[in-house]
Amino acid sequence: MKKSLTLIIGVVVVVVAAIAILQITGLAFGGIPTGCSDTDVTEEYPDGINIMEQGIVTYENRPSEYKDFCQSSTTVKEYYCDNSGAVKSDAIWCGAEGCVDGACVE
């Protein structure tokens, strides 16, 4: 009886850990992410690295979003889609004008 209870607890722990890993990586929400989209992509900024406008990066099949934000009063955390369709981010210094509402001030 004690061995079967230990086995059941072990299996439950493994299953819970696997579900947690899938949720953290996003794979529990539709598989490998597809359709990376960045709202601050423009003709001038085709890569989406536009520090003068706050953007939001999303995937078609993931519930989460990545919004540009001010990491400090002079640095913006800029999210964008790379060439393979993955979300990337860079911390970019805005200069003396600073960062407000997820974008550098002109």
Image (cartoon, rainbow, N blue to C red):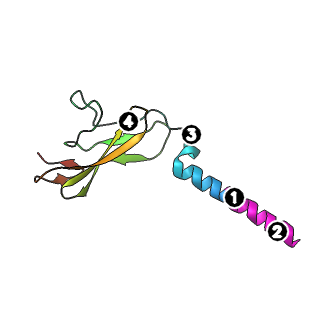
The C terminus sits in image quarter: top left
Q: Which residues are magenta?
A: 1-15
Q: Are marks 3 and 2 in contact (CB under 8 Å)?
A: no
Q: Provide the residue designation for mark 3.
A: 30
Q: Provide the residue designation for mark 2.
A: 5
Q: Earlier in the sequence, mark 4 or mark 2?
A: 2
Q: Is 73 left, or right, of 2 in this rendering?
A: left
Q: Provide the residue designation for mark 4.
A: 82
Residue located 75% across and 66% down the image = 9
* Residue at the farthest right position: 1
Q: Provide the residue designation for mark 1.
A: 14
Q: Earlier in the sequence, mark 4 or mark 1?
A: 1
Which-is-in-front pick, marks 4 and 2?
4
Residue 13 among magenta residues: yes
Residue located 69% across and 62% down the image = 13
**How far apart in space, not on screen, are marks 3 and 2 (Cα)?**
34 Å
Q: Earlier in the sequence, mark 3 or mark 1?
A: 1
Secondary structure under badge 3? loop
Q: Quadrant of residue 54?
A: top left
